Amino acid sequence: MAEKSRDHHRGVVLRSEWISRHMVRIVVGGDGLADFATTGLTDHYVKLVFPLEGVEYPEPFSVKTCRETMARELWPRLRTYTVRAWDPDSRELTLDFVVHGDEGLAGPWAARAKPGDVVYLLGPGGGYAPDAAADWHLMVGDESVLPAIATALEALPDGVLAHVFVEVDGPQDEQKLGSAADARIVWVYRGARRVGEALVEAVRALEFPDGDVHAFVHGEAGFVKQLRRYLRVERGIGLDRLSISGYWRIGVDDEGWREVKRDWNREVEAEEAAAIAS
């Protein structure tokens, strides 16, 4: 495959380390990241490109060309991951991966990744950074959202109040989260419960401080829907003060979720509008 392409970056794995029981950190670098750049958002993401084994792709390699010239079942698979850190001077891109054995595509790849492995990626995209003018911040997510929450906490001004709720399997999945803010971090242990069930309960139990809140709520679509309704309808938080999205959905892979997510969002918005109007 070609070293450079107009629609992707080519990175090389530099090193990796396990930072918790189920999360591995991969640092990617190389000259193929020369055009990579971020813009100060804390939820920047990239789409990792996974060519299918045994498939011959057009040269020079391009996701766009693959989609224009190949059958859909042969397209490279894309998986979305948050940028944990980007150092433009050293051209080092840090990505954290949740790994549950052989489940999924990107997680097993990350668990086996070794220096010299090549990875292709698209992006970055993004849309959120904590508003420095807010009186306080609410950050909520499952382990897939930990990189974005960690990055946002690092960006908060000294002393600003932040209530943070992160759901993980158990104590061995906790991470050290650094911040100059007054960050009140609650680790919610899932155990055998459905993803997000305990997290919704924890957020609903919070006594909301006075003042303007800027909220960031992401993760599995089921609990995101519940919390969106709670924050919008019961708490009256405007969409302009809320970054909220289903990163993933139980029982659906990345391709399947992208196909239905727009319609799902429309349904959620319609239900929410009806509830606010009633």
Image (cartoon, rainbow, N blue to C red):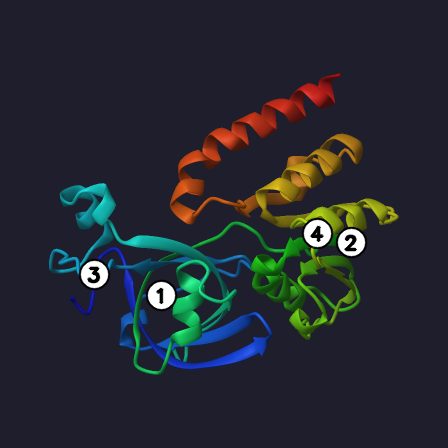
Dot 4 or dot 3: first in sequence order is 3
Q: Is mark 2 in CB contact (under 8 Å) with mark 4?
A: no
Q: Residues within 10 Å of mark 4 (few under 14, many from 20)?
A: few
Tell me, yes or no, whether the two marked residues, 4 and 3, touch with CB atoms within 8 Å: no
Height in image: 90 above or below 275? below
- Number of marks present in the image shown: 4
Secondary structure found at label 2: strand
Name which quarter of the figure residue 8 lies in: bottom left
Between marks 1 and 4 in the image, the one whose residue lies nearer the viewer: 4
Q: Which residue is mark 1?
A: 36
Mark number for residue 193?
4
Q: Residue at x 75, y 69 (%)?
A: 158
- Disc 2 marks a residue whose amino acid type is Trp
Q: Are marks 2 and 1 in contact (CB under 8 Å)?
A: no
For the residues labelled 2 and 1, the Cα–Cα distance comes to 32 Å
Q: Which mark is residue 5?
A: 3
What's the mark number on residue 131?
none
Q: Residue at x 79, y 32 (%)?
A: 234
Which residue corresponds to mark 2?
136
Sort mark 2 into few (<14), some (14-19) or many (20+) by Cα contacts within 10 Å.
Answer: many
